[in-house]
Image: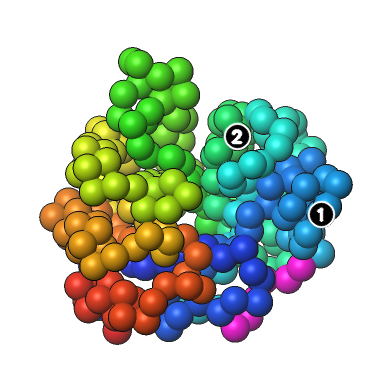
Amino acid sequence: MSNFIIGGWSQNISDVAPTGFDHTMYGMITNLDGLTAGTPDSPGWSPKTTAAPTAATGSVMWTYGGAGATPENMPRNKAENNEIVSCTNQQHWAGVDFDDESTMDINNVVAVMKKLKRQQPPLQSSYTFLAGWDYNNPTASSSGKLINDAVQKIAQAKCSDRFILMCYGDDMWSNADIKANVGPAIERTINNGVPKKEVILALTSVGLNAENLDYFLEQVRSYDIGGLFIWDFSILPPRYLSKIKNKLGIN
């Protein structure tokens, strides 16, 4: 059995994750008021009415938030917390991935995560965040301080199964940015109180090449963290999936 896990995200609810994925996440639920994909004016699918796909491998979660999510500072209250948990239960999702790209209300995120854990059987949660220059330089960036504070608060509450470090933008960072930020972000997350096997490094299929993939895999192995997740696994070239599985000892 491998010491590492792999997983990833898709915006398309019909995409089936590759064999060997431990966790598959569908989203992004960016209309946070209505709990739908898309926007309030043009809503997409919703975890309130869409059951977790049964064809996906491993645990199947939905993602609350993501790039462009509105409004900020969500969820706002106990009723919204309860709605997140109830639709997860009712539609047979394994849990919720909180992708914090909209300055979420971390006290309520913690409350939801704790309530997910109290379900029978317990439901999963993960906290996904941008782990670039801002995160690594919190004294120079107000957004970086907020994310560091959030990671520390969630880690102290011991309510999240995984902390997922997004180390990419619209496509893969330059090699210089990767080398300047990926290792420090892993170290910072561990120093923020997260057990190393709960730390997950994440990359994107867009702009991925042999060199930057090798670097990410080496960071996962050298720090002995939890594993590697892929944004938009539907366009991940098969040769790169094979390399990931071979390097991490996954069948």
Label 2 packing within 10 angstroms: few (<14), some (14-19), many (20+): some
Residue 102's label in the rendered image is: 2
The answer to whether 9 appears left or right of 229 in the picture is right
Which span of residues is magenta-colored? 50-55
Picture residue at 59% right of the left edge, 76% below the top: 15
Q: Which amino acid, mark 2?
A: Ser
- Name the magenta segment's main secondary structure: loop
Residue 155 appears anywhere in the view: no
Whole-angstrom CA distance, mark 1 to mark 2, is 18 Å
Quarter of the image that includes the C terminus: bottom left
Q: Residue furthest top?
A: 139
Q: Which residue is mark 1?
A: 43
Q: Secondary structure at mark 1?
A: loop
Q: Position of residue 90 (x, y in %)?
A: 76, 64
Picture residue at 83% right of the left edge, 52% below the top: 42
Q: Which amino acid, mark 1?
A: Pro
